[in-house]
């Protein structure tokens, strides 16, 4: 068996293991759908009236859905960080590490499962958004572009959460990645126009990666001008994703030679 | 071809963590098809030894080989020979026993993983729980599943890190039978334990590790002649009598506890020695308030072994 076939088969098995685990404990999955939906409901129905003025001619629900989708993708990756550090804590990674398998499959299988699970929840969120009045005006190209961007973002954030899971001391503390995800999602143009923010926060919000990603997704869904947001979003995702991937592979090796 | 008969070879293996030396030059040799027990208390270096042999850690110094393959330069070859069962059952709680086994079979690229899984479930008495989630299993069942996952794919050498720690007496004796059966089927078993009795029951050879060094090694019979077989605890009335008895028994290994007014005497377990100890005390007109006889613990063994070393050093 060549090294490549071996690593493909092992990656498939690992992804299967993780998918099977996700399906067997759907509570996490439900939580990942419910939390962003609740957020969406609060923003649309409670705060939406007051915030509508800041979003110009766009309806607030149309404005907020891209931010909710990114929040949902972020929430999904929390599960990944927790699972990775749980596997270390319980000695499952040690077992894999002592087996004659393609070692890369342990992390790659994890990422594949996370992206599939995330995409599934994103579809559910978009359906829920339609129910509360989300009316996108994208054509096929807009939808395809948006799907590609969300897939890329999901890959990036998953690799980051893998790194987080490898770094933290216990599975309990791995959940704290949610805090950073919330910080970056809320302090962006996802829920309010950045012009309304105080100057320091505004500088942060306008220059952090979530803003161009949300802007690009919104522009594609609502058929508006993209400016350079898509390019910026893609560059952010690719650079951060690659860096996280390299860090994850190194940490995996180092952690297990030492722990 | 002596080399072909050797499953594990360790030569002067050293390992430190953040300046703390955990292994200080460990030498071991384990014959194929045997059960080898590494006996030691917490923090003696047992798990570190297993981690080095199972390619999880790199030794700082020295050489370690599994079936002739070097653990540092040929980890892939080593991994094909071994299976590791850690101190805590490394099983997926939310999956069924059958799925846990099947996935390991897939990772080992075996054919008919379903058939193999069923066979192992039967062998380990888990067929009735095959389709239940592991989270519903008892501690003993989890360990059995863990070991079944380890031997999926028929590795030649099995590492078991404290396989009976935390198990109730019944599960413990069931585990002993499993380990004996593994050796009967021709596998080499390397296990660690904190219990002298367990090592004596199971192993063909025992090595005792303390503070990162092997302090004794041999067959259970060989060790029996050098290790204590019995321990008596004597309680005395006052300090004077305690000192008097301590000096009467100075040719025995004794441990004196002044606050508790008690004295621990290590014996070879024979009636002659017991009679000797009590007659010496009686002849000097000292009354013992109470005494208990018990099996030596690992601490007693270390006390004797290290005490002898110090006497040799002087």
Image (spheres, rainbow, N blue to C red):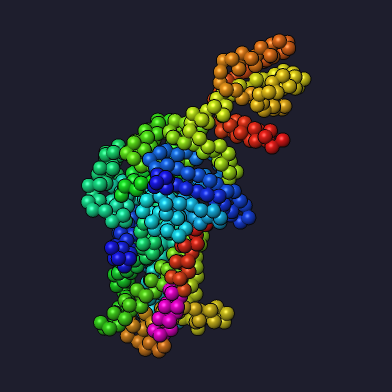
Magenta: main secondary structure:
helix
A13 shown above or below B258: below
A150 horizontally vs B197: left or right? left
Q: In which quarter of the image is residue A233?
A: bottom left
The image shows residue B203 at horizontal and vertical percentages of 44, 35
The image shows residue A205 at horizontal and vertical percentages of 50, 79
Where is the C terminus of chain B found, in terms of image quarters?
top right
The image shows residue B48 at horizontal and vertical percentages of 52, 49
Q: Is residue B197 magenta?
A: no
The image shows residue B204 at horizontal and vertical percentages of 44, 35
Residue furthest right as drawn: B240
Q: Could one spot residue A191 in this view of the protein? A: no
Task: Residue at 25%, 51% (x, y): give it.
Answer: B113
Foreground residue, A202 or A84? A84
Query: Magenta segment, which residues?
Result: A229-242
B140 shown above or below A26: above
């Amino acid at each position: 068996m060549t090294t490549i076939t071996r690593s493909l088969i092992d990656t498939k098995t690992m992804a299967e293991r993780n998918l099977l685990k996700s399906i067997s404990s759907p509570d996490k999955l439900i939580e990942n759908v419910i939390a962003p939906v609740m957020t969406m409901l609060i923003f649309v129905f409670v705060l939406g009236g007051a915030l509508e003025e800041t979003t110009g001619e766009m309806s607030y629900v149309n404005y907020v859905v891209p931010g909710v989708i990114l929040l949902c993708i972020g929430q999904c990756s929390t599960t990944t960080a927790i699972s990775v550090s749980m596997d270390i804590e319980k000695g499952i990674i040690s077992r894999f590490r002592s087996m004659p398998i393609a070692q890369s499959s342990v992390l790659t299988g994890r990422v594949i499962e996370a992206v599939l699970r995330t995409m599934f929840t994103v579809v559910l969120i978009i359906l829920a958004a339609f129910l509360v009045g989300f009316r996108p005006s994208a054509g096929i190209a807009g939808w395809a572009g948006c799907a590609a961007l969300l897939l890329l973002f999901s890959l990036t954030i998953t690799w980051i959460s893998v790194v987080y899971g490898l770094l933290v001391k216990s599975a309990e503390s791995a959940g704290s990645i949610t805090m950073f995800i919330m910080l970056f999602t809320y302090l962006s143009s996802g829920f309010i126009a950045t012009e309304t923010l105080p100057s320091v926060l505004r500088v942060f919000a306008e220059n952090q990666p979530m803003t161009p990603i949300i802007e690009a997704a919104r522009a594609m869904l609502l058929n508006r001008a993209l400016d350079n947001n898509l390019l910026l979003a893609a560059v952010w995702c690719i650079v951060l994703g690659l860096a996280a991937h390299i860090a994850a592979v190194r940490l995996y090796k180092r952690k297990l030679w030492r722990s | 071809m002596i080399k072909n008969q050797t499953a594990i070879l360790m030569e002067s293996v050293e390992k430190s963590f953040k300046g703390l030396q955990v292994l200080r030059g460990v030498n071991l040799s384990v014959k194929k098809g045997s059960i080898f027990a590494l006996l030691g208390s917490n923090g003696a270096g047992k798990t570190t030894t297993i981690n080095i042999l199972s390619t999880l850690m790199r030794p700082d110094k020295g050489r370690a080989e599994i079936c002739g393959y070097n653990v540092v330069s040929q980890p892939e070859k080593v991994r094909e020979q071994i299976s590791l069962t850690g101190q805590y059952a490394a099983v997926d709680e939310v999956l069924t026993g059958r799925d846990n086994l099947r996935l390991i079979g897939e990772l080992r690229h075996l054919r008919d993983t379903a058939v193999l899984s069923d066979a192992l479930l039967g062998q380990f008495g888990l067929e009735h729980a095959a389709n239940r989630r592991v989270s519903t299993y008892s501690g003993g069942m989890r360990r059995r599943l863990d070991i079944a996952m380890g031997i999926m794919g028929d590795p030649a050498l099995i590492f078991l890190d404290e396989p009976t720690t935390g198990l109730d007496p019944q599960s413990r004796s069931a585990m002993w039978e499993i380990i004996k059966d593994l050796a009967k089927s021709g596998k080499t078993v390397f296990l660690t334990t904190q219990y002298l009795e367990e090592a004596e029951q199971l192993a063909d050879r025992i090595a005792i590790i303390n503070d990162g060094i092997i302090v004794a090694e041999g067959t259970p019979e060989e060790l029996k002649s050098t290790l204590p077989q019995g321990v008596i605890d004597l309680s005395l009335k006052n300090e004077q009598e305690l000192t008097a008895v301590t000096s009467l028994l100075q040719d025995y290994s004794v441990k004196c506890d002044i606050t508790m007014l008690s004295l621990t005497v290590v014996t070879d377990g024979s009636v002659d020695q017991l009679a000797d100890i009590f007659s010496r005390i009686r002849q000097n007109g000292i009354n013992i308030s109470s005494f208990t006889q018990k099996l030596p613990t690992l601490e007693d063994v270390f006390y004797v072994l290290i005490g002898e070393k110090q006497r040799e050093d002087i």
